[in-house]
Image: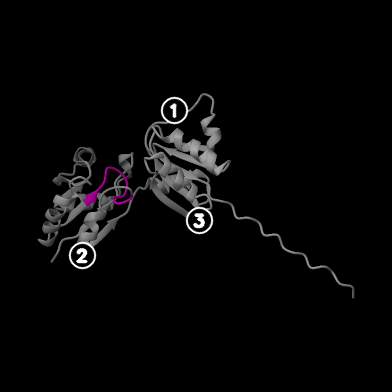
Amino acid sequence: MYGTLYIVSTPIGNLEDLTFRAHRILQEVSVIAAEDTRHTQTLCRHYTIHTPLTSYHDFNKTEKTPILLGRLKEGKSIALVSDAGTPLISDPGYYLVTRAIDCHIPIVPIPGTSSIMAALCTAGLPTDAFTFIGFLPKKSAARIALLHSLLEESRTIVLFETPHRIKTTLSAIQEIFGDRRVAIAREMTKTHEEMIRGTAEEILLSNPPRVLKGEMTLLIEGRKKRKKHLRQTPKTGG
């Protein structure tokens, strides 16, 4: 019988956010496949988890995937974790999961903390529908083209951004989206957690100018539905 591949969500900052189930799974599996073993080792030390670690990331997935699949076929279970949050969400793991599916290996999600959900529920923007686009392209032309393609999107737009590009991205949002509301969730669940709300222009022109550091989830208000003007039917005499 094949072992199980567990997709385990880990804290995005505060180590207390690890779920009881995730803790148990990380203790019971044969090995933890981690994006960065040094980062995951900090979590394991905090919870006295002694399960062996092995690295698994985008740069070694071709050579490591057959090894992990071999262990799973031998009946050993494996936990896949990323540095923070849920694997596969702008993190490594898709390559392994698709090949495990091809081999009919059981795959079980262990849900937990998500920076996307944490940002959405505190941003003050509509949550009934949203679209997640991950990181914007690094090249300026591609980044602007993608933002332009989202101009008519009515759902709340969620993306990740880095400190060294956030001002450039806010400037592009101001130019393309105008005065729509924006929210920046910075360092969620960590000591310096902060939610910044306003328009892109308001954030850029804040006094003193904001120096934004740390991991960020950026949300943009969707296009508001245009009100339909009903054509009035002229009254007739009776």
Write the residue at 27% across / 42% down: 83
The residue located at (20%, 37%) in the rendering is 38
| Kind of residue at badge 2 | Asp
Which residue is most to the right? 238
- Percent of width and height locating residue 196: 49, 36
| Amino acid at pointer 3 | Asp
Up-down relation of residue 128 to residue 140 (above or below) = below
User: What label sits on residue 102 in the rendered view?
Assistant: 2
Q: SS for tag 1? A: loop
Q: Nearer the viewer, mark 3 or mark 1?
A: 1
Whole-angstrom CA distance, mark 1 to mark 2, is 47 Å
| Figure check: 111 above or below 217 | below
Q: Is residue 118 above or below residue 171?
A: below
Q: Which one is nearer the viewer's eye here, 107 or 203?
A: 203
Marks 2 and 3 close (CB-CB < 8 Å): no
Question: How would you rate the neighbour count of disc 2 (Cα within 10 Å): few for under 14, some for 14-19, many for 20 or more?
Answer: few
**82 inside magenta stretch:** yes
Tell me which numbered mark, 3 or 1, is placed earlier along the sequence: 3
- Could you tell whether 157 is left or right of 36 in the image? right
SS assignment for the magenta stretch, majority: loop
